[in-house]
Amino acid sequence: MKRYFRYILMGMMAVVVAFSASAQTADGMLKKAAAAINGAGGLTAFFTLDYGQQKMTGTLKASGRKFALQTSSTSTWYDGKSMWTYNPNTKETTLMTPTPQEVGEANPLAIVNSYSSAFTASFAKSQTKGSKTIVLTPKSKQSGYKSVHVTIPDGTSFPSKLVVIPSSGQKVSVSVSQVKTGQKLPESSFVYPKSKYPKVEIVDLR
């Protein structure tokens, strides 16, 4: 009987150790991904965005927390404090001081970059050969997210796909096709080029 209980105890300990190792590995992969993004210097990423019935391609230029996003429907610039979004359909540009959630919705890589403060990481139950998918679960119910799924190909630390599922609203899926790193991007890359849109109204929401 003592031997039986000892085997049960050993089995329970093995499960706990395996679970902890899995969680640490998922967290470790995200830390490496964040380090890869932070250590890339200036980077340019080419991606495909799926949003409801809409599908479009775009380009992201980023350096640290700053980024500029270009798609066929909108253009966004974020200098680390203020965010401008130009809508060619309305011929308007909105200017705001975004929340962390709004920054993450505009640039999902920003979520990976600072995930540890707002999310816990674990491996997805279903995995695809050749990559690992990690699920980020918000620590707070007020975060605005249900979850974020980050797919990282084997042998690299750069995410190839991010799926953002907000608490309310439409799921956003971003598939990264190519990333160029080590680029020198001037500070003006992340500031709204007002001279380029002289007749566009700026709606200041700050």
Image: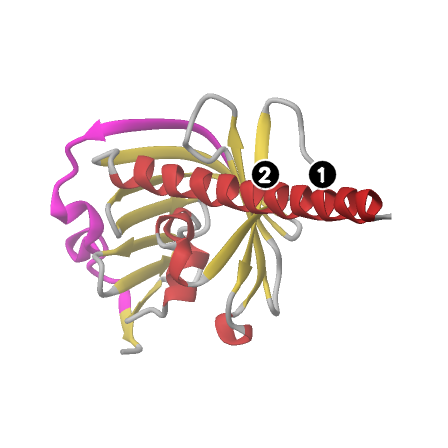
Q: Nearer the viewer, residue 178 or 153?
A: 153
Q: Nearer the viewer, residue 70 or 202?
A: 70
Q: Is residue 51 left or right of residue 36?
A: right
Taking the spot 43% from the left edge, 25% from the top edge, the residue there is: 156
Q: Is residue 25 left or right of residue 204?
A: right
Q: Is residue 196 magenta?
A: yes
Dot 2 or dot 1, earlier in sequence? 1
The magenta span reads 174-201
Taking the spot 35% from the left edge, 47% from the top edge, the residue there is: 69
- Classify 159 as above or below 113: above
Q: Amino acid at mark 2?
A: Thr
What whole-number distance in Å separates the C-alpha atoms at marks 2 and 1? Answer: 8 Å
Where does residue 198 sit, x and y in percent of width and height? 19, 59
* One can see residue 164 in this view: no
- Classify 169 as above or below 34: below
Q: Nearer the viewer, residue 181 or 151?
A: 151
Q: Is residue 83 magenta?
A: no
In the picture of the structure, the residue carrying the numbered disc 1 is: 126
Q: Amino acid at mark 1?
A: Ser
| SS for callout 1 | loop
Q: Quadrant of residue 92?
A: bottom left
The disc at residue 133 is 2
Where does residue 188 sit, x and y in percent of width and height? 14, 48
Taking the spot 58% from the left edge, 33% from the top edge, the residue there is: 132
* One can see residue 4 in this view: yes
| SS for callout 2 | strand
The disc at residue 83 is none
Q: Quadrant of residue 186?
A: top left
**Circles 2 and 1 in contact, beta carbons < 8 Å:** yes
